Amino acid sequence: MSENNEKKGFFSEMIFNNPVFGLYLGICSTLAITTSLNNAIGMGVAVIVVLVLSNIAVSLIAPLTPDEIHIPVYIVIIATLVTLVGMLMQAYTPELFSALGAFIDLIVVNCIILGRAEAYACKNGVAASARDGLMMGLSYTFSLLAMSLIRQLLGTGILSFSNPMSGSEIFSIRLIPQGFEIPVFKTQTGAFLTFAVLAAAVAAIKLNSEAKEKAKALEAAKAKKKEAAKA
Amino acid sequence: MNLFTIFISGMLINNVILAKFLGMCPFMGVSTKLSSAIGMGIAVIFVILGASVFSWVLYYFVLVPAHLEYMKLICFILLIASFVQFVEMFIKKQSPSLYKSLGIFLPLITTNCAVLYVALDNITQKYTFIETVVNSIGVPAGFMLMLVIFATIREHLDGCDIPAAFKGNPIALIVAAIMAIAFQAFAGLV
């Protein structure tokens, strides 16, 4: 995250620096578990916790680790945190744990986490790394939410969210009348389609802003030429 | 479940990419050329087979007797990372020509979630040793099949007139969506 993007604000950072739709990191879990809002939020929170803690641990331990073995060290840190989070989820949110299945364990190989440890946490301080982990985790969760909103709404016609601890429903609204939902969005095909369209949307926004910047630069250059000609 | 069912189910019905969404990162990265797709496929079959067999042995002969089952995630990921490193060094020393064609794919495989998934899945499904071997060949065979099919399609996509925003990965994902429909037909096989 560069200084430049921090000024752009929270939402544009989520679009321009989005790890999922922009860089294609961590897409396995994004495609697999985004069938409902519950799964998306559960997975998002698990990843945020692991990412923030692993970034903190890596930034503390980085000066002490020899360069040749830094990747195995980071992987062990991440695997330990994922095991802990998995155990906690199994104890307190058993339904969510079984819905997410193997993908809790597979957080270990989520490229975003090792990627942030490698690219950011090992070179920066504790506070900055924790902030970076939180931001990256939030934009990952944001992508999960976008995917699962579209898939749950079009696939079942209902938007619902329930308390992961007790399983009781918090809200459930039917927005698309029965018989008009598109069940294909619940399947693998729907996951690929939704992802492709969202990734293309992010690419389109980027292309658009690049084109605008170019046009601005051109105009500025023209104005300078005119001034030079006047002088 | 007999061995043939395990193989077919691992390769086609529960295809790692289209049904389980695993190994997407190397899949998107490598499936642009046929030659690299075949190289990556062979490397993945070899690594998944080796890593799963070693993890199975480690789990049933070390972790279970020591009552350390909850350590399986940490042990397996370390085992996979070191196995990949070892294979890389071994090939580099023994066969430089093979290293030239496969070497660049090996570091990528550590981050392939399919490897860890197969190792963990063999334990959750309570497979015997023989079943583990069959499953660990079937799953990466399905991965390689997808890579090869995909690489051929993407080589043709290069010459098509695609909207700028869809160029590259998004259009590949649309192709994957259409192929997922085709692969759903395999669900009736067993």
Image: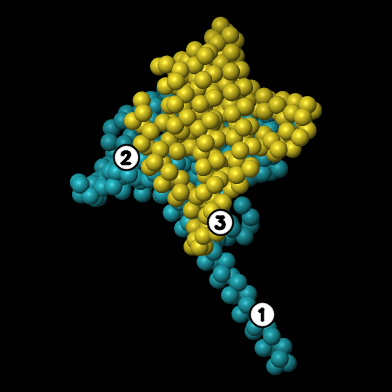
Chain colours: A cyan, B yellow
Q: Nearer the viewer, residue B177 or A46?
A: B177
Q: Is residue A230 left or right of residue B150?
A: right
**Amino acid type, label 3:** Asp
Q: Is residue A4 left or right of residue B22?
A: right
**On-image quarter of the N terminus of chain B:** top left
Q: Residue at x 51, y 28 (%)?
A: B139
Q: Depth-wise, is mark 2 or mark 1 nearer the camera?
A: 1
Label 2 sits on residue: A161
Q: Position of residue B103 (x, y in %)?
A: 71, 36
Q: Position of residue B160 (x, y in %)?
A: 51, 60
Label 3 sits on residue: B158
Label 2 resides on the chain identified as A
In this rendering, does residue B182 appear at all? Answer: yes
Label 1 resides on the chain identified as A
**Amino acid type, label 1:** Ala
Q: Earlier in the sequence, mark 2 or mark 1?
A: 2
| Residues tagged 1 and 3 counted as in contact (Cβ below 8 A) | no
Q: Residue at x 53, y 57 (%)?
A: B167
Label 3 resides on the chain identified as B
Label 1 sits on residue: A221
Outermost residue, bottom direction? A230
Residue A5 lies, with reference to residue A153, above or below; the image says: below
Distance from disc 2 to disc 3, alpha carbons, whole Å, reads 42 Å
Q: Nearer the viewer, residue B69 or A131?
A: B69
Q: Position of residue B180 (x, y in %)?
A: 41, 41
Outermost residue, top direction? B65
